[in-house]
Image (cartoon, rainbow, N blue to C red):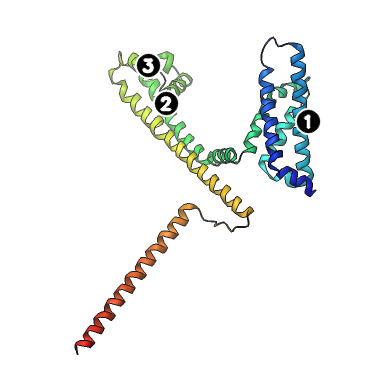
Amino acid sequence: MKAIEALLANRIFQNAIIGVILLNAAILGILTVPDLDPAIVDALHWLDHACLIVFCIEILLKLITLRVGFFRDGWNIFDFVVVAIALAPAAGPLSVLRALRVFRLMRLVTAFPSMRQVISGMFGAIPGVASVAGILLVIFYVAAVMGIGFFGEIDPENFGGLGPAFFTLFQLMTTEGWPNMARTIMETSPLAWLFFIPFIVMTTFTTLNLVFGIVVNSMEEAKEEAAREEMSAQGIDAPPEKVEVRLALIEKNIKEAVADLAALQNNLQRLIKTGRSGKGK
């Protein structure tokens, strides 16, 4: 058991698995090339099967060492699902899953801690992003109803209903070709810019920046959590507080130290004055 654990933790073994993942990704890409020689296709399929065997052996070794604990780690479950999809039969109703075998390349995410931190940050940002998405949906709905009322007759192709209006507003949010659309409408309605510019500012330059801020903050928290786990693995007690809390505590300690120094300085000045007055007498 210890030998298997040592093998899984071995850096050479981990690099070999990464190499197999990259090789498998290259094989799947080459298999998409049309008019390949049948002999080459057969050889690539054999290599693909060999890579799959390596992945199965790795999963099996992890199951042997971790047992039930294997499924307590989300990344292990991800690896298991990806490899299980690759084992789906090539014929029958499950054959469509074979097209998803390229997801094996996503196993690189589990191989590199920096990639795991990015993914963890993205998932951690989902609640905040969902709130912003709700606000964005309200803005879209209000703007769509207003746009239909203002420009439904002028430009029915873009504002002829909720569906076309939502698509048009999404195009406006991406700032793709919006000046041409706005100028076309402004030929009939010169004040249309009062609708387009505030909408673009609220969505593109404000709401989306909120999303970016939430994602970045979540990634920082994921990075900090990974640092805590690494410190714990090395036997170092990691502080439970976040960076902001620790900075606030440091600032508080500095203020207290400055206050103590000021009090000490005042006491020294009193002692000096007392000593001088005593000598004068």
Binning the other alpha carbons within 10 Å of mark 2 as few (below 14), some (14 to 19) or many (20 upward) gives many
Q: Which residue is mark 2?
A: 173
Q: Earlier in the sequence, mark 3 or mark 1?
A: 1
Asked whether residue 150 is in view, the answer is yes
For the point 77% across and 27% down, the residue is: 50
126 up-or-down from 179: above or below: below
Quarter of the image holding residue 181? Answer: top left
Q: Earlier in the sequence, mark 1 or mark 2?
A: 1
The total of numbered circles placed on residues is 3
Q: Amino acid at mark 3?
A: Met
Q: Position of residue 127 (x, y in %)?
A: 53, 41
> Residue placed farthest to the front in the image?
12
C-alpha distance separating marks 1 and 2: 47 Å
For the point 39% across and 14% down, the residue is: 155
Q: Secondary structure at mark 3?
A: helix
Asked whether residue 67 is in view, the answer is no
Binning the other alpha carbons within 10 Å of mark 3 as few (below 14), some (14 to 19) or many (20 upward) gives some
Q: Which mark is residue 181?
A: 3
162 up-or-down from 211: above or below: above
Q: Position of residue 21 (x, y in %)?
A: 68, 30
